[in-house]
Image: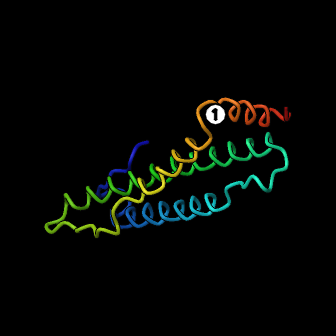
Amino acid sequence: MIAPTVHLNGTDGETLRVQLETAARAVQKALDAVYAAAPNARDYPLTAAYDIARATNSRHLRALVTVRDDLATSWEHVQEQIDARSASPRRVAQDDAPLFAERQAFVEAQNDAAGDAHEDDIAAAANNFDDGGVS
């Protein structure tokens, strides 16, 4: 990931910052929605189907976390450039602190919940599912 550089011939720094912040927050909302829609074992009569659904949900969550973190890193990079050019740097409020770490723990917890021994079975089931077959 390469963060944008604020300079005279490019997009205004504040415009870039707002765009990146808006995008990072939107992906966070999507992440919250996908997390809320996590599979429930009661909805899958077959254990293998539930395992595939959990693996798929985890894959989606990891992808969203990556996108959100990249956007947030760019947002912070642009803000740092704005602050460096400003006589009085903008103070970031405590609630404006990075949204990143907040959901990172939940992905790890979901992966841990699958159990180490069970994780290989989930990955195999997901790969088989991606190939068009269910074992």
Q: Quadrant of the N terminus?
A: top left
Residue 97 pos. (x, y %)? 33, 62
Between 70 and 28, the one lying in front of the other is: 28
Q: Residue at x 48, y 64 (%)?
A: 25
Q: Which residue is mark 1?
A: 119
Between 18 and 6, the one lying in front of the other is: 18
Which amino acid is tagged 1? Glu
Residue 85 pos. (x, y %)? 19, 60
The total number of labels drawn is 1
Residue 70 pos. (x, y %)? 45, 49
Q: Residue at x 86, y 33 (%)?
A: 133
Secondary structure beneath dot 1 equals helix
Q: Quadrant of the C terminus?
A: top right
Q: Residue at x 38, y 48 (%)?
A: 3
Residue 8 pos. (x, y %)? 29, 58
Q: Is residue 80 above or below residue 91?
A: above
* 121 on left or right of 78: right
* 25 on left or right of 93: right
Q: Is residue 116 above or below residue 101?
A: above
